[in-house]
Amino acid sequence: MAVERTLSIIKPDAVAKNVIGKIYSRFEDNGLKIIAARMIHLSRQEAEGFYAVHRERPFFKDLVEFMISGPVMVQVLEGEGAVLKNRDLMGATDPKQAAPGTIRADFAQSIDANAVHGSDAPETAAVEIAYFFPALNVYSR
Ligand code: UDP
């Protein structure tokens, strides 16, 4: 399987719960390397831009409000099949549907405060990585 990169965001609910380290361990224990990271408090414009594909969805306004409600931790993960591996580790969008042992099953409250974001395909990952890390200094090893 090819080595890939994916964008991960630890959302405001999980940052507030103080579980960044626990979530990072899930990545590291499953062969994903954190090769770039920054903590940011998104502006409304940045959150709307990031979720532009969801602009017409009924949950868009609430999603943006949630994403700007506190700081987020944004990272690039690298590893074999990183995109799908991260999606597997995250679990289903709705934590009630998420498999036991996944990040969302263990740390998320609800479908809107669901602890993490992960790119859904390599093409999306490239766009999302460039959105947060326009000049990416990576420390791949
Ligand atoms: N979301 C929501 N209500 C919904 C569906 C999605 O608040 O009914 C939010 C949720 O935070 C989710 C994000 O919108 O993570 C993006 O939705 P998507 O379907 O892309 O889910 P994901 O890829 O994050 O699992």
Image: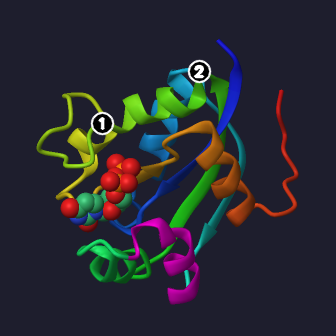
Q: Residue at x 51, y 21 (%)?
A: 30
Residue at mark 1 to residue at mark 2: CA–CA distance = 17 Å
Q: Position of residue 76 (x, y in %)?
A: 66, 46
**Going by the image, does 98 lie left or right of 53?**
left
- Location of residue 88 (image quadrant): top left
Q: Is residue 125 above or below residue 31?
A: below
Dot 2 falls on a residue whose secondary structure is loop
Q: Which residue is mark 2?
A: 31
Tell whether position 52 is magenta: yes
The span picked out in magenta is 44-55
Q: Nearer the viewer, residue 33 or 61?
A: 61
Q: Nearer the viewer, residue 113 or 93?
A: 93
Q: Residue at x 14, y 39 (%)?
A: 97
Q: Residue furthest front?
A: 56
Q: Which residue is mark 1?
A: 91
Q: Residue at x 19, y 49 (%)?
A: 94
Tell whether position 37 is magenta: no
Query: Could you tell me if residue 17 is visible in this image?
Result: no
Amino acid at the residue labelled 1: Gly
Q: Residue at x 74, y 59 (%)?
A: 130
Other-residue count near label 2 (Cα within 10 Å), few / some / many at <14 / 14–19 / ≥20: some
Amino acid at the residue labelled 2: Gly
